[in-house]
Image: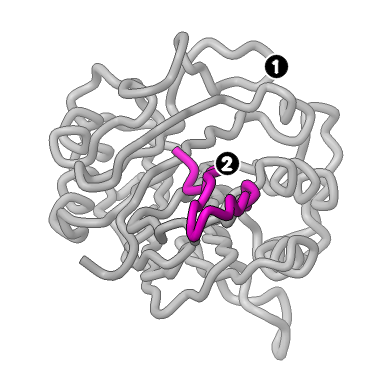
Amino acid sequence: MSNTISRRTLIGGGLGLAVGAFAFAAPAAASPYATIRVATFNIHHGAGGDGLVDLERVAAFIEDLDVDLVGLQEVDNHWGERSAWADQAAILSRLLGMRAVYGANLDLDPPAEGQPRRQYGTAILSRGPILRWSNTLLPKLPAGEQRGLLQATVEARGARLTFANTHLQHTSAAERQAQADAIVALLGERRTMLVGDLNATAEQPEIQTLTDVFADSWAAVGEGPGYTYDAANPHARIDFVLATPDVKPVEARVVTEAASASDHLPVVVEYRVRKGTH
C-alpha cells in the first residue's frame, strides 16, 4: 500500500479550506535481503560446437546471463596451442569487467625457460569484491586427473558469502566420492554456494554426499530435467548449483542459447540472501 496524503477539507472559522491530494512517496524500507544471481559454466577452454576457440563468444553469453558470480571449469592459462597460450581467466575478466581468481589444478613446466607455467583449472568471476580466495587440490587416484576446489569469500549486493567452484573426476565414481567427502570437510555450513561440473547425476552416491549438506537448487526451483550435457544433445544433468539452507533459491534455468559456445550448457540460479555477514 502506498503512503499518500488523501484529499480532505479543513473547516475553521466558517471557512472551508480544500487541501489537494499530494502523493508524498514515503521512502521504501531497505530490504534486509539481497537478490544474487549466480551461474556455473564449463567453457571447454572456449571451444564451441563448431570447434573454434572464441572467448569473445563465451564472454557474450556470460554477459547475457547478467550474473553477480560465475564459476567456470576447463579454463586454460598459457596451456598450449589449442587456446593460443592465452590466460583465459584474465581475458574474460577484462571483457566482462569482472574480478577473477584462478585455480590451477594442472600446473606444468613452461615449454621454454622464462615463459609462463602451463596451467589448467577453474576460475571464479565476480562483479563485487573478492576478499580472499584459495584453491585446494582434491584427492585423486594414481591414474586420475588432478582436480581442485576453488573457493572465494565475496561481497555481492551487500551480502558476504562463500562461493566455491569445482570440477570432479569424470572417469571414476570412487574418486568422485573421495572428492565429494573432501569438499564437505572443506566448506562451511552457512552462507555458502557450491557450483561446478560434477560429472555425475543427482541420484549417484557422491552427489548425494554433497546434497546432504548443500541443497540442490535445481531440484528446489527448476522446471524440467535440467539437462546440461552435452550442449548439442542435452541428456544428462551433471552441472550443479548448490547452496546451504540459509541461501534460498528463487529461480533456476538452463541456458540453451549458449549451446554454440561450449559442450556444456550453463545453469543460472537466483537467490535471496540476507545482507551482511551473518
Choose between 34 and 254: the one closer to the eye: 34
Along the horizontal axis of the image, is 177 left or right of 256? left
Q: Which residues are magenta?
A: 1-22
Along the horizontal axis of the image, is 219 left or right of 38? left
Q: Residue furthest front?
A: 14
Q: Quadrant of residue 34?
A: bottom left
Choose between 97 and 194: the one closer to the eye: 97
Residue where numbered disc 2 is placed: 41
N-term mark: 2 or 1: 2
Residue 21 located within the stretch drawn in magenta: yes
Mark toward the viewer: 2 or 1:
2
Image quarter of the N terminus: top left
Choose between 5 and 17: the one closer to the eye: 17
Q: Which mark is residue 96?
A: none
Query: What's under tag 1, amino acid-wise?
Result: Ala
Query: What's under tag 2, amino acid-wise?
Result: Phe
Image quarter of the C terminus: bottom left
Residue where numbered disc 1 is placed: 232
Residue 180 located within the stretch drawn in magenta: no
